[in-house]
Amino acid sequence: MKVQFCGAAQQVTGSSHLITLDSGYKILLDCGLYQGSDDEMANFNQKFLFNPSELDCLIIYFYFQALKFRWL
C-alpha cells in the first residue's frame, strides 16, 4: 500500500490523500480546496497531483459547509 499526501500537508485546508493498494485499487480520501492567499499555493486548486480518471473510489470523511471541494 502507498499513501500520497496531495494536500493539507502542514496546512489546514486542501485535505486530499491518495491511497493505492497493492492491487492497484486507488482510493482518494477527500478532495479539498486550498483556502488562502499564499503565492506558492496560487495554482493548487487548478490541477490535481493525481489523475482523477484513474480513481476507483472517493471517500469524503470530513465536510464543513463553509469549505468548498474540488469536484472530479
Image (tube, rainbow, N blue to C red):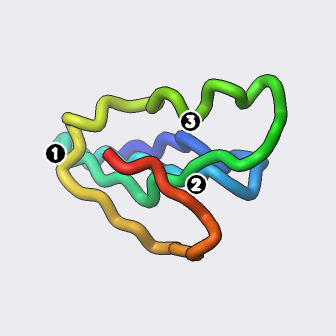
Dot 1 and dot 2 residues touching (CB under 8 Å): no
Crowdedness near tag 3: few (<14), some (14–19) or many (≥20) residues, C-alpha within 10 Å: some
Q: Give the amino acid type for the residue marked by disc 1 in the picture.
A: Ser
Occupied quadrant, residue 51: top left
User: Residue 41 placed where, x, y %?
Assistant: 72, 30
The front one of 72 and 66 is 66
| Nearest to viewer (mark 1 / mark 2) | 2
Res. 8 mark: none
- Element at badge 3? helix
Dot 3 and dot 1 residues touching (CB under 8 Å): no
Q: Give the amino acid type for the residue marked by disc 3 in the picture.
A: Asn
The front one of 61 and 22 is 61
Depicted 36 relative to depicted 42: above or below: below
Crowdedness near tag 2: few (<14), some (14–19) or many (≥20) residues, C-alpha within 10 Å: many
Residue at the farthest right position: 38
Res. 23 mark: 1
Residues at marks 2 and 3, CA–CA distance in whole angstroms: 12 Å
Res. 15 mark: 2
Residues at marks 3 and 1, CA–CA distance in whole angstroms: 29 Å
Decide which of tag 2 and tag 3 comes sooner along the chain. Answer: 2
Depicted 46 relative to depicted 59: above or below: above
Total numbered badges shown on the rendered structure: 3
User: Residue 9 placed where, x, y %?
Assistant: 69, 46
Depicted 8 relative to depicted 52: above or below: below
Q: Give the amino acid type for the residue marked by disc 2 in the picture.
A: Ser
Decide which of tag 3 and tag 1 comes sooner along the chain. Answer: 1
- Element at badge 2? loop
Which residue is found at the position 30% from the left and 53% from the top? 27
Which residue is found at the position 76% from the left and 50% from the top? 11
**Quadrant (top left, top right, bottom left, bottom right) of the C terminus:** top left
Decide which of tag 1 and tag 2 comes sooner along the chain. Answer: 2
Res. 45 mark: 3
